[in-house]
């Protein structure tokens, strides 16, 4: 998928700010694939997004690494947060409600490489990467089809965190 935006994220607050920017543009049926290595900030991004859509800063958003999926009721849609790290075979996905999530929910998926053929074709991919080490800044790349490019066309080109956000 073509790249739509690339942002430098100097600290955790910047990761959350990007999550909030995207949260405001999501609608039922949307899926975000949160790609990137362990510790890149995928759960941090999901937590910021879920708290914003829940309108509740204190919502507990644990990593779903053991449950594989946790759901949240938000005013816009049910939010499904998957962490597929422990999925070894795409057949394990059958019982997790992925189809329901993709049809009517807002879906966030950590470790989307585990999806195999279940990967939704129309998802927006958010790739987070460590640019130096675990203490250093992160980089985010947004990739998606032309529909996503149009929907995100009003996002700032450079993420001047602290100024606009
Ligand atoms: P993942 O889910 O990708 O394994 P986490 O969301 O658990 O990663 O985040 C790991 C760590 O990265 C957390 O301690 C978080 O505070 C930190 N972090 C998130 N975003 C940034 C950032 N932009 N710069 C520096 N640290 C960050
Ligand atoms: Mg995580």
Image: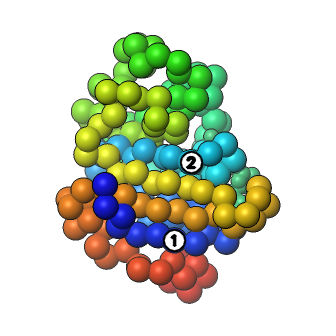
Residue placed at 43% from the left, 44% from the top? 33
Q: Secondary structure at mark 1?
A: strand
Residue 155 position in % (x across, y down):
37, 74
Mark yes or no: residue 58 visible.
no
In this view, 150 is above or below 97? below
Answer yes or no: do the residues labelled 2 and 1 have beta carbons within 8 Å?
Answer: no
Disc 2 and disc 1: Cα gap in Å?
14 Å
Name the residue beneath numbered marker 1. Answer: 7
In this view, 127 is above or below 111? below
**In terms of image quadrants, where is residue 143?**
bottom left
**In terms of image quadrants, where is residue 29?**
top left
Residue 154 position in % (x across, y down):
31, 76
Name the residue beneath numbered marker 2. Answer: 36
Q: Work out whether residue 81 or residue 136 is closer to the camera in this orientation and state it.
A: 136
Residue placed at 66% from the left, 43% from the top? 38
Q: Secondary structure at mark 2?
A: loop
Q: Is mark 2 within 8 Å of ligand 1?
A: yes
Horizontal side of residue 116 vs 44, given as left or right? left
For label 1, count other residues whose C-alpha is less than 10 Å away and answer few (under 14), some (14-19) or many (20+): many
Residue placed at 25% from the left, 45% from the top? 122
Dot placed on the residue nearer the N-terminal end, 2 or 1: 1
Mark yes or no: residue 90 visible.
yes
């Amino acid at each position: 998928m073509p790249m739509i935006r690339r942002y430098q994220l100097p600290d955790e607050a910047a990761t959350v700010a990007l999550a909030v920017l995207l949260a405001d543009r999501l609608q039922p049926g949307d899926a975000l694939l949160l790609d990137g290595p362990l510790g890149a900030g995928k759960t941090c991004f999901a937590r910021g997004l879920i708290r914003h859509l829940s309108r509740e800063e204190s919502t507990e958003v644990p990593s779903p690494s053991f449950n594989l999926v946790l759901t949240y009721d938000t005013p816009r849609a049910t939010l499904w947060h998957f962490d597929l790290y422990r999925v070894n075979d795409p057949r394990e996905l059958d019982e997790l409600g992925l189809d329901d999530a993709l049809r009517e929910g807002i879906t966030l998926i950590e470790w989307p490489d585990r999806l195999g053929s279940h990967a939704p074709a129309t998802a927006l991919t958010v790739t987070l990467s460590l640019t130096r080490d675990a203490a250093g800044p992160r980089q985010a790349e947004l990739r998606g089809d032309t529909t996503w490019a149009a929907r995100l066309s009003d996002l700032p080109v450079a993420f001047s965190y602290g100024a606009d956000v």
